[in-house]
Image (cartoon, grey):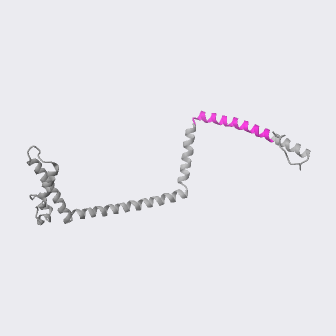
């Protein structure tokens, strides 16, 4: 392997022999060091096994150490503060939005138009129930019941449409 290397012709034979000798010694040293390292690693593993230190425990320790190092870093702290502030602002915005929507629904529910619509629905449901209860043998199709309820609802006077919900017990 070493003898197959073609060195430039600028070296003398004596220099070449000296370099080849040094290279051979280095390769032997590297081989010896690898054997010593393998032996030391084996001994290291045996000692850990005696202490009950498993690869999983080592992994957990390394992970916990890395996690701690990350959490104490300046970048993590700044990012955490920024996200916390953004979360608080988003939460406040949603709370405000929810309050506004609730208020609008409350206003809409108290409006005369909605009350009139609500009364018409109640009257229609009441008429349908009365028609079904009053009919013999369940007569009439669903379309007929709806039609008769709509007809009855259309005959109401405009003053009844604008009445307050306290008048809700009137006859439909």
Q: Position of residue 118 (x, y in %)?
A: 18, 59
Q: What residue appears at the point 17 percent right and 62 percent down from the top-left corner?
A: 116
Q: Quadrant of the N terminus?
A: top right
Q: Quadrant of residue 120?
A: bottom left
Q: Where are the magenta residues, as a range?
A: 26-53
Q: What residue appears at the point 8 percent right and 48 percent down from the top-left corner?
A: 134
Report the side of 56 relative to 148 (left or right): right
Q: What residue appears at the point 85 percent right and 44 percent down from the top-left corner?
A: 19
| Residue 69 lies within the magenta run | no
Q: Position of residue 137 (x, y in %)?
A: 9, 43
Which residue is more in the foreground, 42 or 135? Answer: 135
| Residue 44 lies within the magenta run | yes
Which residue is more in the foreground, 104 or 151? Answer: 151
Q: Position of residue 57 (x, y in %)?
A: 55, 39
Q: What residue appears at the point 80 percent right and 42 percent down from the top-left corner?
A: 26
Which residue is more in the foreground, 30 or 73? Answer: 30
Q: Quadrant of residue 154?
A: bottom left
Q: Quadrant of the C terminus?
A: bottom left
Report the side of 96 relative to 60 (left or right): left
Which residue is more in the foreground, 45 or 137? Answer: 137
């Amino acid at each position: 392997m070493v003898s197959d290397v073609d060195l430039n012709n600028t070296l003398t034979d004596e220099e070449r022999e000296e370099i080849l000798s040094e290279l051979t010694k280095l390769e032997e040293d590297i081989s010896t060091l690898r054997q010593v390292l393998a032996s030391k690693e084996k001994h290291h593993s045996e000692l850990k096994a005696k202490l009950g230190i498993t690869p999983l425990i080592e992994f957990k320790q390394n992970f916990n150490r890395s996690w701690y190092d990350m959490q104490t870093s300046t970048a993590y702290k700044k990012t955490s503060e920024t996200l916390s502030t953004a979360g608080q602002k988003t939460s406040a915005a949603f709370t405000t939005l929810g309050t506004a929507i609730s208020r609008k629904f409350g206003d809409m529910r108290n409006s005369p138009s909605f009350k009139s619509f609500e009364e018409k629905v109640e009257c229609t449901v009441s008429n349908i129930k009365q028609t079904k209860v009053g009919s013999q043998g369940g007569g009439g199709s669903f379309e007929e019941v709806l039609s008769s309820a709509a007809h009855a609802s259309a005959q109401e006077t405009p003053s009844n449409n604008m009445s307050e919900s306290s008048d809700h017990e009137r006859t439909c």
